């Protein structure tokens, strides 16, 4: 009897997992579920997570790095966690967390000064970790807190015409983000459109995470933060290697590296790239 699989996440990692499973004659991929997309991928339907209960599958492969939140959603739906397989999501998510933790240790050891920031916060999943690993640094959090802006979408070539796209990342709030922070007193919320929300901020940084998915705000943020980084520190950019889901982001990072000569290094999570601020 073939095992029936549902893949949670119809992005780049979901696609990779599908391709790996496709050659296995013991498995059928019945559906994808995704919080933001519906439609089809490889001829397989993509459903909203609520549909999961009625799908009757044997295993659910989690492919999103926000797997802790997804596990919570699965519990809320009343589905047994024993069905959940999370190797890919765990490896990718844990590698990025380990990078952050190790980098923070090194920056403290070398006494690199400066505050920290994230542009692209959504519900604060990664911001919480930045706040935890840099407890004595001010943490600036930049987001519209209402999803993408049309001014950026206009720059996206070949971007998937998904009807749900306009609603991406709207379900969040400043209160929710603050409630997750271990040191909320360090947090400065910068609500608004990047790069406009940089106006009036005068500070130096040792670590910045960029997670805005799109070409234009990523390029603008690199240009704004890089001169404000202290030597030894750097800027981490998520999703650089997921060119399936984010076809234009990588182009912006390469454009920036070429205009400044900044050095970039993959961090081993199969998704992110790190821009180092040279002395
Ligand atoms: C992938 S989510 C961030 C995920 C988050 N880092 C986490 O740990 O879960 C992308 C976020 O970027 C924000 N964003 C995209 N373009 C932006 C812009 N130009 N200005 C401000 N925020 C933007 C969206 O509102 C969304 O919350």
Image (tube, rainbow, N blue to C red):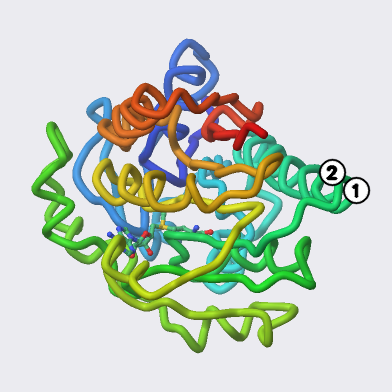
Q: Position of residue 42 (x, y in %)?
A: 27, 25
Structural crowding at the residue carrying mark 1, measured as other residues with C-alpha within 10 Å and reported as few (<14), some (14–19) or many (≥20): few
> Residue 209: which disc?
none
Q: Is residue 215 left or right of residue 257?
A: left
User: In which quadrant of the rendered view does residue 85 lie?
Assistant: top right
Please name whichever residue, 166 or 143, is drawn nearer the observer in this view of the structure.
143
Rendered view: 219 above or below 75: above
Q: Residue at x 65, y 68 (%)?
A: 128
Q: Residue at x 56, y 27 (%)?
A: 270
Q: Is residue 14 among the parts visible in the rendering? A: yes
Q: Quadrant of the N terminus?
A: top right
Q: Is residue 254 left or right of residue 44?
A: right
> Residue 106: which disc?
2
Q: Is residue 1 among the parts visible in the rendering? A: no
Q: Secondary structure at mark 2?
A: helix
> Residue 109: which disc?
1
């Amino acid at each position: 009897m073939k095992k029936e699989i549902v893949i949670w996440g119809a992005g780049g990692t979901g696609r990779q997992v599908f391709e790996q499973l496709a050659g296995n004659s013991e498995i059928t991929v019945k559906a994808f579920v995704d919080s933001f997309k519906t439609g089809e991928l490889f001829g397989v339907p993509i459903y909203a997570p609520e549909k999961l209960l009625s799908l009757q599958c044997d295993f659910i492969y989690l492919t999103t790095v926000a797997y802790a939140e997804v596990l919570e959603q699965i519990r809320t739906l009343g589905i047994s966690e024993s069905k959940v397989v999370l190797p890919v999501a765990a490896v990718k998510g844990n590698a990025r967390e380990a990078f952050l933790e190790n980098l923070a240790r090194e920056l403290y050891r070398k006494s690199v000064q400066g505050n920290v920031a994230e542009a692209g916060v959504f519900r604060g999943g990664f911001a919480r970790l930045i706040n935890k690993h840099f407890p004595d640094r001010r943490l600036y959090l930049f987001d519209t807190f209402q999803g993408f802006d049309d001014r950026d979408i206009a720059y996206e070539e070949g971007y998937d015409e998904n009807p749900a796209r306009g609603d991406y990342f709207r379900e969040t709030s400043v209160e929710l983000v603050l409630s997750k922070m271990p040191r909320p007193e360090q947090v400065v919320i910068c609500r608004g459109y990047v790069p406009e929300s940089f106006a009036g901020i005068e500070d130096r940084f040792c670590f910045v995470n960029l997670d805005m998915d799109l070409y234009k705000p990523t390029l603008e943020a690199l240009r704004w933060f890089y001169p404000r980084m202290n030597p030894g520190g750097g800027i981490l950019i998520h999703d650089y290697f997921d060119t399936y889901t984010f076809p234009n982001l990588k182009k912006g990072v390469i454009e920036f590296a070429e205009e400044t000569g900044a050095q970039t290094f993959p961090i081993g999570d199969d998704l992110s790239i790190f821009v180092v601020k040279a002395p």
